[in-house]
Every structure is written in C-alpha cells, then in structure tokens.
Image (cartoon, grey):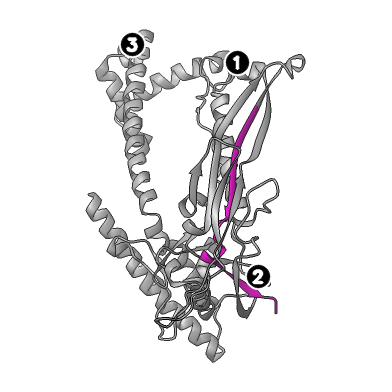
Amino acid sequence: MSDLSEIKQILDQQGRAFEEFKRTNDELIKAKADGKAIGDLEAKLAKIEKEGMSAGEAASAKLQAAEHEAKQAKAAAEEAKQALEELEAKLNRQGLGGLKGGTKTDVNAWARAVVDAHVKGVVNLSESQRKALEAVEAEYKSLSVSNDTTGGYLAPSEYVKEIIKGATEISPVRQLARVRATGAKSIILPKRTGQFAAVWVAEQGDRSETTGLKWGQLEIPAHEMYALIDISKQNLEDSAFDLEGEITFEATEQFAVAEGAAFVSGTGVGKPEGFLVNADVGITVTGAAAALTADSLFDVKHAIKTVYTRNANWALNRTTLGSVRKMKDGNGNYLWQSGLALGKPNTIDGDPYVEVPDMPNEAANAKPVAYGDFMRGYTLVDRIAMSMLRDPFTQATSGNIRFLLSRRVGGMVVLPEAIRVLKCSVS
C-alpha cells in the first residue's frame, strides 16, 4: 500500500469513527434525558473511542509498525534460508540411510513431507515421504534434545538480546515551553513590572511626568537531579548487554519523566516550578462539581488576552480528553474536531491540544485543564544535558562499580498572564 493510500485510509477510518461517535453520543445524551438504560450505549462509545478515534493519532505508529514488520519478514526469510542450508549440511554429514546420503533432492522431499503431514495428515503421505520422516525421527530418537545427556546440551536455546520494556509516559514539556541553554548556574531575565499611562493634553496645557514604568528581573536556577546505580564488576564484564548503555538510556528516560512532572506541579524548591503551582497563574472554576463542562472550557479560553490565543494550546491528559470529545457547544457542534484532512493537528474549539500525562484527572478541587501560550509563559533552562561518573573505587571492596548520573535543568513561569488553569468545583 502506498503512503498516499495509507493516509487516505486512515483519514476515512477516523472520519467514519467520529461520525459514529457523534451519533452514539447523541443517543446517549437523549437516553439520559429520557431516563432510559445507558449501559450499552456507554460501552459502545468506549469501544469507538478505543478502536476508532485513535486511528489518526496512531497514524505514524502504524506506518512505523508496517515498516518494522516488513523488515522482520525479510529477516525471517533469511533465517529460514540459512536454517535450511544448515540442515542440509548436517544431513549430508550424517548420511542418513532413509535419505539416501542426504542429497538436496532428498532434503527437499523431507521438507515437503513435513508440510504435507501438517496439511493433509501423516496417513495421506506417499511412501517416500513417510520414509523420509521416519529416517529423521529415528535420528532424533538417537540424539534427542529432550534429554540433556543424549543431545540436549548440544542444542542450546536462543538468547534474544532485546529487553521487553513497558511504555513510559512523559509529559512533552519541550513541545510547549521555551527552552534556553546556558553555561552558567542560572539565567536572569529582565521583566517589565509596571507601565505608565498616556495622558491627553491641550495644545498649551501643562505636561507633568507620567510615572509608573518599572523593571525587575527573574532568576531561573539550574536544579540538579541524579540517579545512582551499583553494578557488580563481573556483571559488567560478562553481560550479553551493554549495561552502561542501558543505564544511560534508563536515566535519560527517567530524567525526562521527572522534568515533565515538575513542569506541571513542581514546587520550585530544589526543582522547577510547575504552572499549576504558580500563585499568579489565573484560575477559572468550572461551576460543576468534580467535572468539566463545555461552557467552562469557553470561559477559560476567553479569560486570557487575545494576543496569547494566537499561539495557544490546551494541556490535558488522555482521560480528560475522552470527556472533552463528548462535549458540544450551544449550537450542537462537537468541540473536538479532526484536523488531519487539512494537514493540521486535531483541535478543541479550533485550538490544538497536547496530551500531558502529569495533568490530574477530573475531580473535586483538581485542575485538569490548562490553556494558553506556554511558549511565552514558561521557560526551561538546560545547564547540563546529562553527565555520567563511572566510579570503580567507592565500592571496590564489594566488587561493584558505581555509576552516578546527573542532569541540571531549571524551569519557571515567567509570564503568568499567558496561561490560564481550569479548576473543578469542590461541590
């Protein structure tokens, strides 16, 4: 399938799924209003959400998987060819009587016999095919891999050099905030803290000083986070894996997890400051206990200055996004819209959104949604991307080598008025 046809198929699939999603949700709303049972409709809606609506957002992953499968198929074919050649060589060396010396023709006959035995059944094989199978079976019995002493030790299992890892969710901090690199312990940003007001005056009127223009500064320090791992010297020497590389990968991932969490809810003490914690970031209360409403999303959107809406994003987690997908405006139009057909990201009321796993779920007194120009409102500072100290001395008497990995990064809300948070009512 070509890339264009693949993309078209994905667009068609998501379009059909969203239309079905809207119809089902409309039925669910009506059933609730009429006091009817809604269990089946809720289950159907959840199924569409899971199986259909994720098609667009998983487009790149699907293409990547197809490419990966093609590579795997090619590798499997090459392995099968190599295995057949090795088998032929073994049979030629062993000179099995049933295979008349193990010629290539006889090996092919044995291979066909194996396939036909699976498809047609052993009783339907020809006499020559049965003899080929019996000859190999006799050899297998004399050198059985099921018994270590009769051949099992000579048939080791294959060790796959690939570690199975669950997915780690990371808040996409750098997709939203402004990132600055520094070679110092901190950066200082000058900031305007006051403005004068222009005054109308007559042609020959007196003009006095217009006061009020003031400046200040913000300092964003580069905080440190670390990981400390002890590994035995022998493990490093004998492992089938590059353990130093694995440690570096794991540290990079976990540092990103910690950074993303601090971006959302960091205290600012010894770590970056989160935009949900900053006292100057404005808050809009939903008015509905422990839940979001379409009106509350409009309220938070229109509570910030127009200039910030030109580059604004919604920030919410995947669970909250599922709730927002069901919401409509006053004209019955769904707030969530697919933008893939136009080559744009999906939107909520016309603005793009970013899934931020560290955002809280809907709950009483929680802040599940934020909106604004995070690029202007929040600044990240990179001091040291990552450093690794390999210490063979501290744990030498224990036979261990210590790895100390660290990273220095800072973050702070620099323009609170550019961001607005939506908070659920307590009751």
| 380 versus 104 height, above or below | below
Up-down relation of residue 18 to residue 234 (above or below)? below
According to the image, label 3 marks what residue? 92
Name the residue that disc number 1 marks. Answer: 237
Circle 1: residue type: Glu
Chief secondary structure of the magenta portion: strand
Which marked residue is nearer to the observer: mark 3 or mark 2?
2
Q: Residues within 10 Å of mark 3 (few under 14, many from 20)?
A: some
Residue 14 location, x and y as percent?
35, 65
Q: The magenta stretch spans which residues? A: 404-427
Going by the numbered disc 3, the residue's amino acid type is Asn
Label 1 Cα neighbours within 10 Å, binned few <14 / some 14-19 / many ≥20 = few
Element assignment for label 1: helix
Closest to the observer, 167 or 267: 267
Q: Kindly tell me whether residue 283 is visible in this rendering.
A: yes
Q: Are marks 3 and 1 in contact (CB under 8 Å)?
A: no
CA distance separating discs 1 and 2: 51 Å
Q: Earlier in the sequence, mark 1 or mark 2?
A: 1
Q: How far from the left and from the top, in percent, is residue 53?
A: 41, 64
- Is any atom of residue 170 visible in this view? no
